[in-house]
């Protein structure tokens, strides 16, 4: 079986000891081995501050509403009249867009209230549920239900939330509710939908941990949250982390602080992922990986024009250990405002961001345009990090990234300015969409790339099902796996709700010369995979298929 981080037929070059990996093209790993960048749209008219892929392979993109006109008009002469908007009371431009991955087209959507720096999740039925924002939108819940006929648009529920939620984090729960945690000067959490016994204006619970870990500006923004298989929530803020029983509002345990004492959440904006949960293992190990961040004081210093180098450290914590301790490693280059995503292979892509400064308008310098791939497996003779090919476009503050069903990464956004500024500024507002194609998409791997022909698309937890797929070339049964990945809500370097489960395999059999049937057990419980839509990938020797969407039903 090949080493799990090297691709077959390819030998990734040893990491260069090169410091400025964001300099010119034609560095090591450019070309196929470093992946490939493609411009999808030169402009979709808005800058993609927030991104959510839905199960019809369309992506809801949205920005703030309070910076004036965007570069895209609303259809049919429609306008938004908002007496509370801080810039334009009448605005006939769009601040949200629906991008169609299959056709590479987009259409404007209409949001009414301010969605600035908000949060979201996908409901078990596949609707985007977006929470909070700023000003007249800070207590709104908005939903978007996908449709086939081009008629769907945002629906808003103003003042639904009991507290204002600006820079909060959302997590889908095993029962299909969404928990909304934190936000600017909100050291509390609440639920969507509200419980019957949790209605009214005081329906929130105080979380003291967020008070204890707030920064020198009284902020504790976009905490990192992951639903653990024991049903508790991993919550990380500043340098500390806990396991929270949200039902009883008790801290079950406090894990060790991350040893390199650099704050990791906004505005120090590192990123965090829960590594794939493998149901084939005897013990269900759960590991959290956090990379990047910015030292204390970086924000204040950047406001004064002094851009401090970000952190290059990554910490990995096995939260299922009795006495866990952080394993620390350094990325080849420091990074703040990077996005971390799980690739279908189970490795982690670290993309976007800068080397100096912090999150905040005008506060980042030296874009890091080369993604990194972090090898998740322990067998890593050449080191965990591979440096990929550089993007021609810097993606700084307010940029986003999402894994698509075909294995490409959709990249958008970057607007480090208060308004849309295209000239006479460092790092102009970027309205484009790009795709990054990781090395596994290189055509030379097509021979062994699985193609899913059929799979059950509705599943209950624990249910066994079979996947029929085709592989033209060699099938490496011992490295074959099926995995499900959730489509995260992406903003501000966070991929909220991102999780991957490697499904328990019950064996593969050949049906005809190039067709196979893989029997797998669906996720064993809702704490491992909450109800909703997931992308199902089959991976053969490190080469993933395109995904089909499956839906895990509520009980
Ligand atoms: C957006 O509109 C402005 C003002 O009309 C124009 O200068 C700019 O080139 C446009 N940018 C893009 C990417 O379309
Ligand atoms: C950015 O855009 C805003 C609004 O259009 C304008 O007032 C401001 O002067 C621009 N800033 C720069 C540096 O061009």
Image (spheres, rainbow, N blue to C red):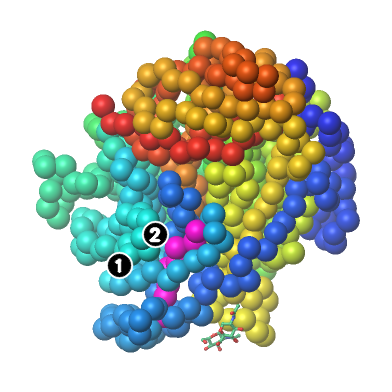
Find residue 366 and report its horizontal and vertical position in percent.
72, 64
Q: Secondary structure at mark 2?
A: loop
Quadrant that contains the C terminus: top left
| Main SS category, magenta section | strand
Residue at image mark 1: 137
Q: Is residue 377 visible?
A: no
Circle 1 Cα neighbour tier, 10 Å, few/some/many (<14 / 14–19 / ≥20): many
Circles 1 and 2 in contact, beta carbons < 8 Å: yes
Q: Position of residue 314 (x, y in %)?
A: 65, 39
User: Which residue shows up at 79% across the image and 38% down it?
Assistant: 444
Q: Position of residue 415 (x, y in %)?
A: 57, 70
Numbered mark located on residue 129 in the image:
none
Q: Quadrant of ligand 2?
A: bottom right
Q: Find the distance from the CA under tag 1 to the CA under tag 2.
A: 9 Å
Q: Earlier in the sequence, mark 1 or mark 2?
A: 2
Q: Position of residue 42 (x, y in %)?
A: 63, 71
Which residue appears at 19% of the width and 46% of the height? 194
As displayed, is residue 41 above or below residue 195? Answer: below
Give the residue at mark 2.
118
The N terminus: image quadrant:
top right
Residue behind label 2 places its C-beta within 8 angstroms of ligand 2: no
**Is residue 222 in view?**
yes
| Residue interval drawn in magenta | 93-100
Q: Is residue 547 magenta?
A: no
Is disc 2 surrounded by few (<14), some (14 to 19) or many (20+) residues within 10 Å?
many
Above or below, 431 relative to 374: below
Give yes or no for residue 95 being in the magenta stretch. yes
Judged left or right of residue 196, residue 296 is: right
- Residue at (67% x, 63% y) in the render: 39
- Direction from residue 214 to residue 286 in the image, left or right: right
């Amino acid at each position: 079986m090949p080493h799990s981080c090297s691709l077959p037929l390819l030998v990734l070059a040893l990491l260069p000891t090169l410091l400025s990996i964001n300099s010119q093209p034609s560095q090591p790993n450019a070309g196929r081995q470093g992946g490939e960048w493609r411009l999808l749209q030169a402009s979709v008219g808005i800058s993609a501050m927030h991104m959510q892929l839905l199960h019809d392979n369309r992506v809801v993109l949205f920005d703030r509403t309070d910076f004036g006109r965007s570069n895209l008009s609303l259809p049919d002469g429609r306008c938004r009249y908002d007496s509370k908007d801080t810039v334009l009371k009448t605005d006939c431009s769009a601040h949200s867009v629906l991008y169609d991955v299959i056709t590479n087209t987009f259409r404007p959507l209409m949001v009414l209230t301010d969605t600035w720096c908000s949060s979201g999740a996908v409901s078990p039925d596949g609707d985007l549920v977006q929470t909070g924002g700023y000003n007249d939108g800070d207590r709104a819940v908005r939903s978007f239900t996908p449709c086939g006929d081009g008629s769907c648009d945002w629906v808003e529920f103003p003042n639904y939330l009991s507290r204002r939620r600006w820079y909060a984090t959302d997590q889908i729960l095993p029962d299909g509710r969404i928990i909304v945690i934190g936000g600017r000067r909100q050291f509390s959490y609440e639920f969507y939908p509200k419980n019957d016994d949790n209605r009214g204006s005081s329906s929130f619970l105080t979380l003291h941990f967020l008070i204890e870990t707030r920064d020198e500006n009284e902020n504790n923004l976009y905490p990192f949250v992951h639903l653990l298989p024991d049903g508790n929530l991993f919550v990380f803020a500043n340098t500390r982390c806990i396991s929270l029983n949200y039902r009883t509002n008790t801290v079950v345990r406090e894990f060790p602080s991350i040893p390199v004492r650099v704050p990791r959440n906004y505005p120090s904006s590192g990123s965090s992922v829960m590594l794939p949960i493998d149901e084939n293992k005897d013990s269900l190990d759960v590991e959290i990986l956090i990379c990047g961040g910015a030292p204390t004081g970086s924000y204040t210093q950047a406001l004064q024009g002094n851009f401090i180098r970000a952190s290059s450290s990554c910490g990995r914590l096995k939260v299922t250990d009795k006495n866990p301790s952080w394993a620390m490693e350094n990325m080849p280059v420091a990074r703040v405002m990077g996005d971390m995503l799980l690739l279908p292979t189970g490795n982690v892509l670290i993309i976007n961001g800068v080397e100096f400064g912090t999150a905040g308008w005008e506060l980042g310098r030296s874009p890091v345009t080369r993604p990194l791939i972090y090898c998740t497996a322990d067998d890593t003779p050449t080191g965990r990090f591979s440096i990929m090919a550089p993007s021609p476009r810097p993606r700084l503050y307010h940029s986003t990234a999402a894994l698509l069903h075909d294995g490409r990464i959709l990249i958008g956004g970057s607007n480090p300015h208060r308004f849309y500024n295209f000239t006479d500024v460092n790092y102009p507002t970027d309205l484009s969409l790009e795709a990054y194609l990781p090395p596994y998409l290189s055509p030379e791997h097509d021979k062994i790339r699985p193609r899913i022909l059929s799979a059950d698309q509705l599943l209950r937890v624990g249910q066994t099902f079979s996947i029929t797929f085709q592989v033209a070339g060699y099938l490496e049964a011992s490295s074959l796996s099926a995995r499900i990945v959730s489509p995260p809500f992406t903003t501000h370097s966070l991929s909220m709700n991102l999780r991957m489960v490697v499904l328990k395999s019950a064996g593969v059999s050949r049906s005809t010369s190039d067709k196979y049937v893989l029997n797998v057990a669906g996720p064993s419980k809702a704490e491992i995979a909450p109800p909703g839509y997931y992308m199902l990938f089959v991976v053969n020797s490190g080469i993933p298929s395109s995904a089909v969407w499956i839906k895990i039903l509520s009980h």
